[in-house]
Image: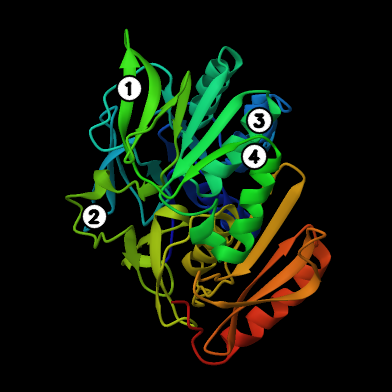
Amino acid sequence: MSIQNVLVVGASAAGLATVEALRRKGYEGAVTVLGDEPHAPYDRPPLSKQVLAGAWEPSRAELRTADFLADLGADFRFGDPATGLDAATRTVRTEAGHELTADAVVIATGVRPRTLPGQEPLAGVHVLRSLDDCLALRADLLAASRLVVVGEGVLGSEIAATARGLGLDVTLTGPLAAPMALQVGPLVSGLLADLHTEQGVRLRLGTGVTGLTGAAGRVTGVELASGEVLPADVVVVAIGAVPATDWLADSGLELDNGVVCDALCRAEEGIYAVGDVARWHHERLGRWVRLENRTNATEQGMAVAATLLGEERPYVPVPYFWTDQYDAKLQCHGFLPADAEMDVVEGELAARRFVVRYRVDGRVTGVLGWNMPKQTRLRRQEVVDALRSDPVPTH
């Protein structure tokens, strides 16, 4: 089918990458981009680090200049969220009452943060997903002295590190035994626990949160399952996110932990999904995958643009994410199961400069580098080689 117009729903990194790739490949048709926020596309990783710390002005997180966006020749419509999709006609309805129909629709609506069950609105309680979330949190942190971060994953750990840099008394809590235990396994998460403790973060891990305490409409603490109450002026809830698919409930698309797609990231004829919201069939792994990381957002947008223009190749990336906490820079390639066999293949743990290799059933599934970026990139080839053979075990 010849594509004359493309509608991208989501002015995110993934949505922008799709548009840019279309233009680079010579597509000259119409492009419309819907964004639910009033802002032009910006980068999310700096929100928990440089922007929250005040090291960057918010404008520095913008992905492209206004002139660059204008040169793309796309119709960017910010601040008008999509509210529904008719998959049969590829028609999207918006909050402002518009109906937009296209030859191809690319869904790039990302995720929304989880909140605590039964959480009542209290001043001083934050999530961190958007630029506005970041600015509101920073304003509260500058007027506070005690922060509790609920959630020991990547985002929670980064926020805790940033807040310590701002001089706050910080407590990190969550059900797992160490920071990022689910993402990197016990060996590296134990070292992260040591790092946060050395930097002055109080760790109250291995127990759940039962609720928040408050007075006069403002949060005063976090109550743990143990009965302990952690006093707080500000609380950040960083307990993960869910795909932003509510607007697709009546679309007819298959929704199951994201928009379910085939190996080409295609949900239905003429409808594709990219970025955090997409759950597609990874042919090299032999299973469905959904990735929440910045690199995937760009690579998947580029892959879908190629498919729209007739270059139909299955999308089979090697997952990659990074995190910066204090002076530690971690790069992670592939899959890092917590139950994998882990061995140090470069550097030394004690020096906090090393590369760890992850193996399941004797097969390499991933590598993680701590302050060794060059060596980590070289070791990535082991993951690539494993993906080229039989499906990699990732349990």
Which residue shows up at 61% across the image and 43% down it?
45
Examine the image and state in which quarter residue 293 appears: bottom right
* 166 displayed left or right of 88: right
Question: Which mark is on residue 89?
Answer: 2
Q: Secondary structure at mark 3?
A: helix
The amino acid marked with disc number 3 is: Arg
Task: Tell me which numbered mark, 3 or 2, is placed earlier along the sequence.
Answer: 2
Task: From the viewer's side, name the closer residue of 387 and 303.
Answer: 387
Which image quadrant: the C terminus?
bottom left
Which SS class for mark 2?
loop
Q: Earlier in the sequence, mark 1 or mark 3?
A: 3
Q: Residue at x 55, y 49 (%)?
A: 154
**Disc 1 marks which residue?**
213
Q: Is residue 202 above or below residue 9?
A: above
Circle on res. 63: 4
Residue shown at 55%/15% (left/top)? Answer: 144
Amino acid at dot 2: Thr
Which residue bears the numbered disc 3? Answer: 164
- Asked if the residue at tag 3 contacts the one at tag 1, i.e. Cβ–Cβ closer than 8 Å, the answer is no
Relative vertical location of residue 241 with respect to residue 94 in this rendering, above or below: below
Residue at disc 4, secondary structure: loop
Q: Earlier in the sequence, mark 4 or mark 2?
A: 4
- How far is disc 4 from disc 2 in space, using C-alphas? 32 Å
From the top left corner, tell me how far across and down residue 146 is, in percent: 54, 21
Residue 279's image quarter?
bottom left
Which mark's residue is nearer the viewer, 4 or 2?
4
Marks 1 and 2, how far apart at CA: 49 Å
Give the alpha-carbon distance from disc 3 to disc 4, as whole Å: 27 Å
**Between marks 3 and 2, how big is the CA–CA gap?**
51 Å
